[in-house]
Image (cartoon, rainbow, N blue to C red):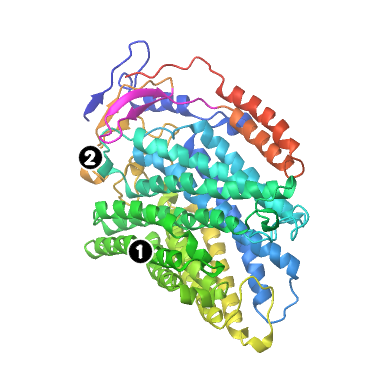
C-alpha cells in the first residue's frame, strides 16, 4: 500500500496513526448518524438522504402510474362513463405533473446524491445541510399537490398549465394556484441539488482523478446540473407570474391589459425541452456504466461521449420553439428551430455508436441491467425517429396535440430514461442494500415491461395519425379508434403489472437476496471499492486514482491518501483540472435546522396560495431558521 501524506497536524489523531478495525470504528462514529427521530431529521449523510430521495421518487412513480392506469381504463372503450371529465382532467394533470416534477428529475438527482461522492472518492457531498433541506422541500411539495388531489381540489390544467386556461378567468378556485406553488416549491429542491453537484464534482475528487478519469455517470449529472441551473428558473418565473396574476391581480399574461399569453409558452418550454435532457442525460451515464461493466472492457470513445454530453446540453436550449410551431412563427424562426431540433440527433447518434462499439468489442454478460439497456436502444431509437418527424413543421402541424405526440414523448422519456433507470436499480441495488436482486424475477420484469410498453404506446402512433386528439376523456364509436385504444389499455396494464413484479423483487431481495460483497459485478469505478452498503465515512482512507477504471488497473489494492482527522469531519478539496489535494476542509455537522427551515418554507408557500401577506410573514420565519442554521460554532479554518 502506497500512501501520499497530506500535511499532518500533531494536535489531532490522524488516519495514518491508527489502522484496521479501530480506524473504521472511530471514523464511523465521527461520520455516523445519531439514533432516534432527532437523529433521523438531523442527518446530513448523502447516502441516507439519497436513499430517501430514491424511495420517495418511486412512491410518486407508483401514484403517477395509478393515475395513468385509471385513464387507460376510461379510454379502453368508446363513450365510457367510468370517469367523468372533471376527474379525468385532474388525473392527466396529476399524471404529467407527478412524472415530470416529482419522479423523473428527482430520481435522477437522487442517484446522483447517493453515487457521486462514492464515485469521486470523497466522504460527503458539498453543502450537506442544503442537501437535507432540498429533500424535505421536495417531499412537502409533492405531498401538497397529492393531498389537494385527495381533497378534490387537484390541479386540472395539465402539467404545462397554459394560460389563459390556467388564468383567473378560466380556472376559478385554488386548483391552478396549488399547481403553480408546488412547481415553484419543488424546483427549489432541484436547484439546490444541482448546485451541490456543480461544486462537488470539480472540487472534491479523489487525488489523481483528472478530468479524463471522471466516470461518465458523473460527467452526465455534472452537465445535467448546469442545465437545471439555467432552465429551472424559467419555469419558476412563469409559475410566480401566474400566482401574481391570480392572487394580486397583475396582468402579465392578459393581452387585454397589455400582457402576453404567448410569454407563458416561451418561458415554460425554455424550461420544458431542456428538461427532457435533464432526465435523459443521467440515463446515458447509467447506460455507459452498465455497458462498460458488463462488456468487460473500457468504454469506446470516452472523449466523444463526454463531448456529446456537453453538446447535447448546449443544443437542448435551442429546441423549445418546436413546441410552438402552430402558434404562428416567422418562417425564418421556424426554419432555425427545425434545424436545431434535427441537430440534436447528432450527439445522441454518436453516443449510441460508442455504446454499440463497446459491446461489439467486449465480452457481454447478459444480466438484467444489460437487458434493460438493450431495451433502451430499441425504444429510444424509435422515439428519436418520430422526434425527427415532429421537428418538421408540416408534419408537426398535422399531428399537433394528437396521440402521435403522446406516443413520441413516451418512447423518448420511458425508453430513454426509465429503462436505463430500471437497469441502474438492478446494477447499484447491491451497493445500496448489500444484497443482489433476484435474476429470474428481473428477467420476467424486463420482458413484461418491454412487451407491455410497446403494446401500450405503439398503437398511439396510429390513433394519432387517424386524428385522435390527446386529453379527451372519451370518444365516439364512429371514429374507428376502439380496437387500437383497447390494445393500448391492455398494454398499459401489462406495463403496470411489470412494476408490481419489480416492487416484489425489490422487497423480497432486501431480505432474501444473495449477499453481494463489495464488488459483485467486478466493476472498475470507485463506488465498488468500499463495502456494500458503504460505511458512514464511505472510505477509511481516501483512494488515489491512477486510471479511469482504478479497480481494473490496480486489482490488489488501491493507493490511498492519508492525513485526515479521525475525530473531526474532514475531507480533501482538490484542484479542478489535475485533482491534486489542495486543502483539508471541515464538512458540516448534522443539524435539525434544515428540516425546520423546510417546514417554515412550506408553510410560507402554502399560505401564499391564499394571501400575499403570507410571503411577508413567512419570510421572517424562514429568516430566523436560516440564522440558526448558519450560526457560527467555531468551525476550523481550512488547512493546506
- The residue pinned by badge 2 equals 556
Which disc, if any, is residue 293? none
Residue 252: x %, y % from top left: 65, 50
What kind of element bears circle 1? helix
What kind of element bears circle 2? loop
**Other-residue count near label 1 (Cα within 10 Å), few / some / many at <14 / 14–19 / ≥20:** some
Choose top left, top right, bottom left or bottom right for residue 103: bottom right
- The residue pinned by badge 1 equals 343
**Dots 2, 1 in contact, CB < 8 A:** no
In this view, 442 is above or below 559? below
In this view, 30 is above or below 123? above
Q: Nearer the viewer, residue 438 or 553?
A: 553
Q: Is residue 549 magenta?
A: no
Residue 470: x %, y % from top left: 61, 72
Q: What quarter of the picture does the C terminus occupy?
A: top left
Residue depicted at 53% across the width and 57% down the height: 269
Residue 207: x %, y % from top left: 28, 32
Is 283 situated left or right of 215 in this image?
A: right
Residue that sits furthest to the top in the current view:
11
* Magenta segment: 569-590
In this view, 447 is above or below 210? below
Amino acid at each position: 500500500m502506497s500512501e501520499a501524506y497530506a500535511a499532518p497536524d500533531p494536535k489531532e489523531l490522524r488516519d495514518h496513526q491508527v489502522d484496521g478495525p479501530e480506524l473504521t470504528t472511530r471514523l464511523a462514529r465521527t461520520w455516523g448518524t445519531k439514533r432516534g427521530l432527532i437523529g433521523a431529521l438531523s442527518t446530513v449523510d448523502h447516502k441516507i438522504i439519497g436513499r430517501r430521495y430514491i424511495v420517495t421518487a418511486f412512491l410518486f412513480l407508483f401514484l403517477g402510474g395509478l393515475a395513468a392506469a385509471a385513464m387507460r381504463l376510461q379510454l379502453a372503450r368508446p363513450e365510457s362513463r367510468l370517469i367523468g371529465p372533471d376527474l379525468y382532467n385532474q388525473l392527466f394533470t396529476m399524471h404529467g405533473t407527478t412524472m415530470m416534477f416529482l419522479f423523473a428529475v428527482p430520481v435522477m438527482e437522487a442517484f446522483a446524491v447517493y453515487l457521486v461522492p462514492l464515485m469521486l472518492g470523497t466522504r460527503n457531498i458539498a453543502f450537506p445541510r442544503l442537501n437535507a433541506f432540498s429533500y424535505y422541500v421536495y417531499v412537502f411539495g409533492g405531498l401538497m399537490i397529492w393531498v389537494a388531489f385527495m381533497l378534490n381540489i387537484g390541479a386540472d390544467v395539465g402539467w404545462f398549465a397554459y394560460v389563459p386556461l390556467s388564468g383567473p378567468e378560466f380556472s376559478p378556485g385554488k386548483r391552478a394556484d396549488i399547481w403553480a406553488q408546488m412547481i415553484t416549491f419543488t424546483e427549489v429542491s432541484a436547484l439546490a441539488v444541482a448546485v451541490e453537484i456543480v461544486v462537488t464534482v470539480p472540487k472534491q475528487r479523489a487525488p489523481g482523478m483528472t478530468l479524463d478519469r471522471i466516470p461518465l455517470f458523473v460527467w452526465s449529472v455534472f452537465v445535467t446540473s448546469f442545465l437545471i441551473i439555467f432552465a429551472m428558473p424559467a419555469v419558476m418565473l412563469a409559475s410566480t407570474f401566474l400566482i401574481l396574476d391570480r392572487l394580486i391581480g397583475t396582468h402579465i399574461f392578459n393581452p387585454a391589459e397589455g400582457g402576453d399569453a404567448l410569454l407563458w409558452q416561451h418561458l415554460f418550454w425554455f424550461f420544458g425541452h431542456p428538461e427532457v435532457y435533464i432526465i435523459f442525460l443521467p440515463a446515458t451515464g447509467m447506460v455507459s456504466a452498465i455497458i462498460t461493466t458488463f462488456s468487460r472492457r473500457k468504454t469506446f470513445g470516452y472523449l466523444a461521449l463526454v463531448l456529446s454530453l456537453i453538446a447535447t446540453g448546449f443544443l437542448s436550449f435551442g429546441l423549445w420553439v418546436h413546441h410552438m410551431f402552430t402558434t404562428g412563427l416567422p418562417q425564418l424562426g421556424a426554419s432555425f428551430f427545425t434545424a436545431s431540433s434535427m441537430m440534436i440527433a447528432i450527439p445522441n447518434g454518436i453516443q449510441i455508436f460508442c455504446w454499440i462499439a463497446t459491446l461489439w468489442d467486449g465480452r457481454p454478460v447478459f444480466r438484467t441491467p444489460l437487458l434493460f439497456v438493450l431495451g433502451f436502444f430499441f425504444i429510444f431509437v424509435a422515439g428519436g425517429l418520430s422526434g425527427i418527424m415532429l421537428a418538421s413543421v408540416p408534419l408537426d402541424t398535422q399531428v399537433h396535440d394528437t396521440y402521435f405526440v403522446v406516443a413520441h414523448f413516451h418512447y423518448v422519456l420511458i425508453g430513454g430514461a426509465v429503462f436505463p433507470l430500471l437497469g441502474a436499480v438492478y446494477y447499484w441495488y447491491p451497493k445500496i442494500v448489500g444484497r443482489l436482486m433476484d435474476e429470474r424475477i428481473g428477467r420476467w420484469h424486463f420482458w413484461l415491461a418491454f412487451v407491455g410498453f410497446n403494446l401500450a404506446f405503439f398503437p398511439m402512433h396510429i390513433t394519432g395519425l387517424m386524428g385522435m386528439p390527446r386529453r379527451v376523456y372519451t370518444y365516439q364509436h364512429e371514429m374507428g379508434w376502439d380496437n387500437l385504444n383497447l390494445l393500448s389499455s391492455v398494454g398499459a396494464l401489462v406495463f403496470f403489472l411489470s412494476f408490481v413484479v419489480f416492487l416484489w423483487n425489490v422487497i423480497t431481495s432486501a431480505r432474501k437476496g444473495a449477499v453481494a460483497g463489495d464488488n459483485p459485478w467486478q466493476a472498475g469505478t470507485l463506488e465498488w471499492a468500499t463495502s456494500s452498503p458503504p460505511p458512514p465515512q464511505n472510505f477509511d482512507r481516501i483512494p488515489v486514482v491512477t486510471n479511469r477504471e482504478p479497480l481494473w488497473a490496480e486489482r490488489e489494492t488501491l493507493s490511498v491518501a492519508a492525513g485526515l482527522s479521525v475525530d473531526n469531519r474532514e475531507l480533501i478539496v482538490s484542484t479542478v483540472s489535475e485533482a491534486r489535494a489542495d486543502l483539508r476542509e471541515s464538512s458540516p455537522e448534522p443539524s435539525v435546522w434544515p428540516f425546520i427551515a423546510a417546514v417554515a418554507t412550506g408553510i410560507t408557500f402554502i399560505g401564499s396560495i391564499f394571501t400575499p401577506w403570507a410571503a411577508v410573514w413567512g419570510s421572517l420565519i424562514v429568516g430566523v431558521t436560516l440564522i440558526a442554521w448558519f450560526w457560527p460554532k467555531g468551525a476550523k479554518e481550512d488547512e493546506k
